[in-house]
Image (cartoon, grey):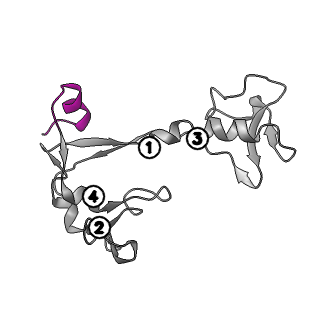
Amino acid sequence: MYPSFEGLRQNKQRVVFSEDFSRLYWPLRGTFPTALSVMKTMRGALQEMEPLQHEDGSWHEIASIPLTEPKVSSINAFIPLLDDYEGNWVAWHEHHEAAEYVKNSNLGARHEYPFETDPAMGYLVKCCGQDRPEYKDSLTIQYIRGY
């Protein structure tokens, strides 16, 4: 089994992404792997993309090509800007007239540590026609032999 991308980086080993890695297109909407598409070339047009996973469950050929050198068993995918997105959204909307709150006690187990510290305010769930964006953890993508 190969080491993880993060393990190699922690050991200060250089990891290089292949040119094929640049062909992957992953928008912020949708789920893995159905949201991913593959451009025909590195400078491909978004109109000329193929799905990473086809409707019949088969994979695009790029799925069998190592995307790093040295090869890795897994890689942690994340977008640093999203780490601040929920807090920024709350700061922007918390004083709007249309802000919709629920009491912290009505949140359920999913929300152990709400951003709001004032129990009188509650938990901001919606404003300006938008649901509150919830913090998203990173996603670990792992190689599985045979796929």
Q: Could you say where residue 146 lies in the image, as x and y percent from the top left?
A: 16, 57
Q: Residue at x 22, y 31 (%)?
A: 9
- Image height check: is 13 above or below 56? above
The mark total stands at 4
* Number of the front mark, 2 or 3: 2
| Mark whose residue sits in front, 1 or 2 | 2
- Classed neighbour count for the residue bearing mark 2: other residues with Cα under 10 Å, few (<14), some (14–19), many (≥20): few
The amino acid type of the residue labelled 1 equals Ile
Q: Residues within 10 Å of mark 4 (few under 14, many from 20)?
A: some
Q: Are marks 2 and 4 in contact (CB under 8 Å)?
A: no
Which of the 4 quarters of the picture holds residue 52? bottom left
Residue 22: which disc?
4
Q: Which mark is residue 79?
A: 1
Foreground tag (2 vs 4): 2
First of labels 2, 3 by sequence position: 2
Tell me whether the residue at label 1 lies in contact with that at label 3, contact meaning CB atoms closer than 8 angstroms.
Answer: no
* Residue 19 appearing in the image: yes
Marks 2 and 3, how far apart at CA: 29 Å
Q: Secondary structure at mark 4?
A: helix
- Residue extending farthest to the right is 97
Mark 1 in CB contact with mark 2 (< 8 angstroms)? no
Q: Is 3 on the left-hand or right-hand side of 54?
A: left
- Residue 43, label in figure: 2
Element assignment for label 2 = loop
Q: Are marks 2 and 3 in contact (CB under 8 Å)?
A: no
Circle 3: element type: helix
Q: Which residues are magenta?
A: 2-14
Give neighbour class at mark 1: few <14, some 14-19, many 20+ (Cα, 10 Å): few
Sooner in the amino-acid sequence: mark 2 or mark 4: 4
Residue at screen point 72% across, 40% down: 92
